[in-house]
Image (cartoon, rainbow, N blue to C red):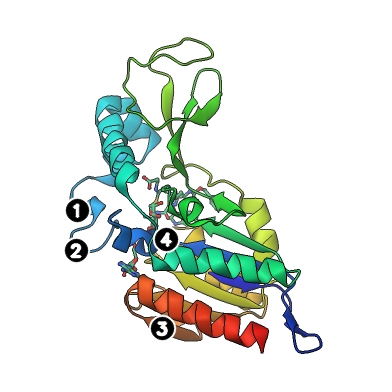
C-alpha cells in the first residue's frame, strides 16, 4: 500500500508529499517468475506452510526447510525486476525530488525492489539472501545454499544457521515504524497481495482509520478488497506502471 502522509500540499504549481509508505506482496514479483503463494499453482499448493515456514517445521525437518529456501535462493539469481518494480523506484525518485520521503515496505523476501533501484526499503518478512544464527544471533548476506551441517562463521556452531525470514508465529520486522507511518496516512495503496496474511493484511484498516484514501492494485480483488475505496485490477507490470504515471502527472501538475 502507499500512504501519502497527511494531505497534499499544493505549492506554486508543485505538490509536496510529506512522506509515502508502499507495501507490496508476491503479486508484484509474479511476472518476474518468483511465484506466488496462494494462486492456483502457488507455492502453498506444493508445500505445506507448517512444514517450511514455521519454527516448528524447521525444528522437525531442517533439511526440508533448507531445500525449500535453497531452491528459491537459486531462482532469485536469474530473476529480474519487472515494470512494476521499476515504476515504484521511479516514484521514490520523483517524491524525493519534491522534498518528500518514500518508504517501501515489502512482504517479499526477494531482492527485486533493490535491483530496480528502490532504496528506502523495509523487508517486513525478512530476506532470502540473508541468514542468521540461532546460537549467537549473528546475521548477514548469504547467496549460496545452506545445509544443516553448515557452520556459523562467527561461533562455529553447525546446524544453528537459518534463513533470515519471518515464519508464521514470528514477529515481522519494523512493525513499530510501520504502524507509526500508517497512523498519519493520506493515501493507502495495496499492491500484489492476497490480503490473507496478518499483520500486513490489517494495514488497510489502520490507514482507513487515519482518514487515508485507499486503493488496491492487484490481479483480482483480494480477500480484503471491500476495505478499499478504489481498485484497479490487472497484471502489476501494467496496472502499477500506469497508476504511477497517473500519480506522477498529478504531482507535477
Ligand atoms: C505474527 C515467510 C505476531 C517468508 C511468510 C492476526 C493478527 C496477527 C497475526 C495473525 C492474525 N491472524 C493470523 C495470524 C497469524 C499469521 C497469519 O497471518 N496467518 C494467516 C495464514 C492467517 N501471521 C503471522 O504469523 C505473522 N506474525 O503475527 O506475529 C504479531 C501480531 C500482531 C502484530 C505483529 C506481530 C508472520 C507472517 C509472515 C509469515 N511469513 N513468508 C517466505 O517464505 O516468503 S508469509 C507469505 O505470505 C509471504 O511472506 C508472502 O509475502 C505473504 C503474503 O502473501 P502474498 O504476498 O499476499 O502472496 P499470495 O500468493 O497470498 O497473494 C498473491 C496476490 O498477488 C494475489 O492476490 C494474486 O491475485 C496477486 N497476483 C498474482 N499475480 C499477479 C498479482 N497481482 C498483480 N500482478 C500479477 N501478475
Q: Is residue 80 above or below residue 195?
A: above
Residue at left 50%, top 60%? 200
Residue located beneath label 1 in the image: 45
- Disc nearer the start of the sequence (2/1): 2
The Cα atoms of the two marked residues, 2 and 1, are separated by: 7 Å
Q: Is residue 123 left or right of residue 103?
A: left
- Disc nearer the start of the sequence (2/3): 2
Q: In this view, does 232 lie above or below 201?
A: below
The Cα atoms of the two marked residues, 1 and 4, are separated by: 18 Å
Residue at left 61%, top 52%? 175
Between 30 and 136, the one lying in front of the other is: 30
Residue located beneath label 4 in the image: 25
How far across and down, in percent of the image, does residue 206 sit? 60, 69
Circle 3: is it few (<14), some (14-19), or many (20+) Cα within 10 Å?
A: some
Residue at left 45%, top 81%? 242
The label shown at residue 191 is none
Amino acid at each position: 500500500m502507499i500512504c501519502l502522509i497527511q494531505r497534499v500540499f499544493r505549492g506554486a504549481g508543485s505538490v509536496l508529499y510529506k512522506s509515502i509508505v508502499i507495501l507490496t506482496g508476491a503479486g508484484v514479483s509474479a511476472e518476474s517468475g518468483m511465484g506466488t503463494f496462494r494462486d492456483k499453482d502457488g507455492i502453498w499448493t506444493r508445500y505445506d506452510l507448517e512444514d517450511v515456514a514455521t519454527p516448528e517445521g524447521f525444528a522437525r525437518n531442517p533439511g526440508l526447510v533448507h531445500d525449500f529456501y535453497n531452491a528459491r535462493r537459486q531462482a532469485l539469481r536469474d530473476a529480474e525486476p519487472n515494470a512494476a518494480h521499476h515504476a515504484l523506484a521511479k516514484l521514490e525518485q520523483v517524491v524525493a525530488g519534491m522534498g518528500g520521503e518514500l518508504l517501501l515496505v515489502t512482504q517479499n523476501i526477494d531482492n527485486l525492489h533493490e535491483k530496480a533501484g528502490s532504496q528506502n526499503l523495509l523487508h517486513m518478512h525478512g530476506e532470502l539472501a540473508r541468514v542468521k544464527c540461532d546460537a549467537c544471533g549473528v546475521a548477514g548476506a548469504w547467496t549460496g545454499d545452506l545445509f544443516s551441517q553448515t557452520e556459523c562463521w562467527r561461533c562455529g556452531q553447525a546446524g544453528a544457521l537459518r534463513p533470515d525470514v519471518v515464519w508464521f508465529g514470528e514477529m515481522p520486522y519494523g512493525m513499530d515504524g510501520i504502524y507509526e507511518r500508517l497512523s498519519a496516512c493520506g493515501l493507502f495503496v495495496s499492491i500484489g497481495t492476497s490480503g490473507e496474511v496478518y499483520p500486513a493484511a490489517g494495514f488497510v484498516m489502520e490507514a482507513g482509520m487515519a482518514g487515508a484514501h485507499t486503493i488496491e492494485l492487484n490481479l483480482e480483488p483480494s480477500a480484503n478488497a471491500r476495505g478499499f475505496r478504489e481498485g484497479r485490477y490487472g497484471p502489476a507490470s501494467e496496472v502499477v506502471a500506469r497508476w504511477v504515471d497517473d500519480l506522477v502527472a498529478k504531482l507535477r501538475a
